[in-house]
Amino acid sequence: MLKDIYKTSLSLLTDFYELSMAYGFWKSGKKDLESVFSLNFRSNPFNGGYTIAAGLQYVIEYLQDFTFHADDLEYLAGLKDEQDRPIFEEAFLRYLADIRFECDVEAMPEGTIVFPYEPLVRVRGPIIQCQLIETPLLNLINFQSLIATKSSRVVQAAGEEPVLEFGLRRAHGIDGGLAVSRAAYIGGCSATSNVLAGRLFDIPVRGTHAHSWIMTFESEQEAFDVYGDVLPDNSVFLVDTYNTLEGVKKAIKTGKRLRKKGFKLMGIRLDSGDLAYLSIQARHMLDEAGFTESRIYASNDLDENIIQSLKAQGARIAVWGVGTKLATAYDQPALGGVYKLNALKSEKGQWEYKIKLSEQNVKISNPGMLQVRRYKKHDEYAGDAIYDEIRGIGETPVIVDPFDITRRKKFDASFEHEDLLKPVFRAGRCVYQTPDIHSVRQHARQQLRHFHKGIKRFVNPHQYPVGLEEDLHKLKTRLVLKARGFNDTKNGG
């Protein structure tokens, strides 16, 4: 997919400091240190109770093509410092010319329901390579996970009624528009208006017509009649150009013409005004005229909260077109994912745990080769344990809430469990069988069914139990205390 969108190398799709650190690792002889990094986020978006992982397909394709082309290196060779000297040595650029991705990567499959501090992606390999891919991984995972989550919330509000993603014209550029369509479909939208996304990602495309179509003709009636003649099997008429309920009457007249020719009036679309009142009136008018199967479509700056409100008011809307507030993640425009070093292998071949401190507890990183084990009982997910694969996890683990150590949960042998991070690359070779986008979408829907409905609430959702496995919690506590000058291991937690 990425090759279809971009015809050039993406190795420079990074922050400059990634290259300057890579140069430092190369210059200081540390470039081959074996390291482990992980990508996670710190809070669920939209004040919600869950997040949907998305973007892995982009990551796989990016890493498979990870290479510096001659024109990339020519550009880097021309970068100068404050004294107008080349920043990078020619020998370093020759090294980059030969570099090939050779790391191990584990990741959450797209469509997996995930929670704060759980690693969505884990990378193990030479530190110079792990560092160089930080920015692109965050770029590719953050936005699509954000949009997939927003889409899921909108779809949840709509219930059994389909949601169409109409956000291209308000999306953040070409890249944003394509990523939105893909992620929105993963999150549950039924189709997109974005034709290029439809071709690239095999997503169904849908659309009606604009007000300009109506305004082109001498009358609204003529506009509907001509559109019905041209596209009799796509006869959804936008009725609010002049007067909505009068527009419904005219759509009904065209519908009768279509019926005589053996076609159906597919529906009408409302794009302004009091959508609850107008949809109720329009439904009554359509039913009275015998068009009980014609559907009412609605658009107009919708989101999950407005949809929920309209449904509570008895709106008779059957299909929801959601654009701006989905495509821009209007109420929270960033996920806030981070990518942190968790461990380094010493010259003696032993893993040394690494931790990042902060004055803010939420920004303290977790050490280790992190994995997530999800527990299930009676067909419902019961909690997730973040654990260190180096140290392992017992058969009856206890998880500790990292922000309230008195909140703990134990899982005994009666719980089923599954490790969520799956092998994606081994020594730079992709070993992952990528599912098609329809399977990813279905995976997200099936996962949500296994969670308590409380986590899906829009207001004050239930907090799903996620914690550090007890030994990992103790290790982290010791490392924090040591870094702050307290070496008393008795206080390890």
Image (cartoon, rainbow, N blue to C red):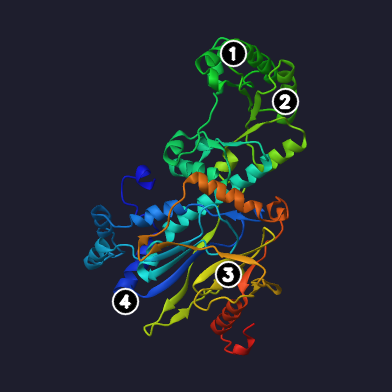
Q: Earlier in the sequence, mark 1 or mark 4?
A: 4
Marks 3/4 in contact by CB < 8 Å: the verdict is: no
Which is more foreground, mark 4 or mark 2?
2
Q: Amino acid at mark 2?
A: Leu
The residue at which mark 4 appears reads as 28
Secondary structure of the residue carrying tag 1 is: helix
Label 1 to label 3, Cα distance in Å?
Answer: 60 Å
Q: CA distance from mark 3 to mark 2?
A: 50 Å
Question: Which picture quadrant has residue 484?
Answer: bottom right
Give the Cα separation between the discs numbered 4 and 2: 69 Å
Q: Which mark is residue 386?
A: 3
Q: Dot 4 lies on which element?
A: helix
| Residue density around tag 3, few if under 14, some if 14–19, many if 20 or more, within 10 Å | many
Image location (x, y in percent) of residue 191: 54, 36
Query: How many numbered dots are placed on residues in this image?
Result: 4
User: What SS does tag 3 mark?
Assistant: strand
